[in-house]
Amino acid sequence: MPQKSSWQLYLIRCGDGSLYCGITTDLTRRFSEHLAQGPKTAKYLRGRLPLELVFKKEIANRAEATREELRIKKLTRKEKESLIKQ
């Protein structure tokens, strides 16, 4: 049976101070794609350099990661900043 990959939820602070939330199974690769500003960059992040990874959280599976991503996206900026400080 193949090993299940864990998922990671992450927050990126953009050059304009805004926050971007996403999920991935390979955070190093995904953050590099965002930094490259190429075709695999999230549209929201294009032109918002510099990018800084400010939060990451490991999550067991995709369903849970998706739910957590949606929950965090609904938080206020103040709540997101509080999460980052923890």
Image (spheres, helix red, strand yellow):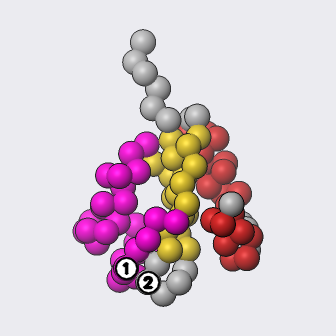
Disc 2 to disc 1, C-alpha distance:
5 Å
Question: Under tag 2, what secondary structure?
Answer: loop
Q: Is residue 34 above or below residue 57?
A: below
Which quadrant of the view contains residue 72?
A: bottom right
Locate the C terminus by quadrant.
bottom right
Answer with left or right where residue 78 lies relative to residue 18. right
Q: Is residue 66 left or right of residue 4?
A: right
- Marks 2 and 1: CB-CB under 8 Å? yes
The amino acid type of the residue labelled 1 equals: Pro
Magenta extent: 25-54
Name which residue type carries label 2.
Gly
Percent x, y of residue 36: 26, 68
Query: What residue is shown at x 57% (from left), y 49% (from top)?
Result: 57
Instruction: Identify whether 16 is placed above or below 59.
Output: below
Residue 40 within the magenta-colored segment of the rendering: yes
Instruction: Give x and y (percent) for residue 56.
Output: 54, 54
Mark 2 = which residue? 15
Q: Is residue 73 visible?
A: no
Q: Which residue lies at the image location 66% right of the left edge and 51% below the top edge? A: 68
Asked whether the viewer can see residue 84, the reply is yes
Task: In the displayed orientation, state which residue is furthest to the bottom.
Answer: 16
Left or right, 61 with reference to 37: right
Per the rendering, the mark at residue 6 is none
**Which is nearer the eye, 42 or 83?**
83
Point 50% across, 35% down: residue: 6
The residue lying at 55 percent from left, 80 percent from top is: 18
**Residue at the disc numbered 1:** 50
* Of callouts 2 and 1, the N-terminal one: 2
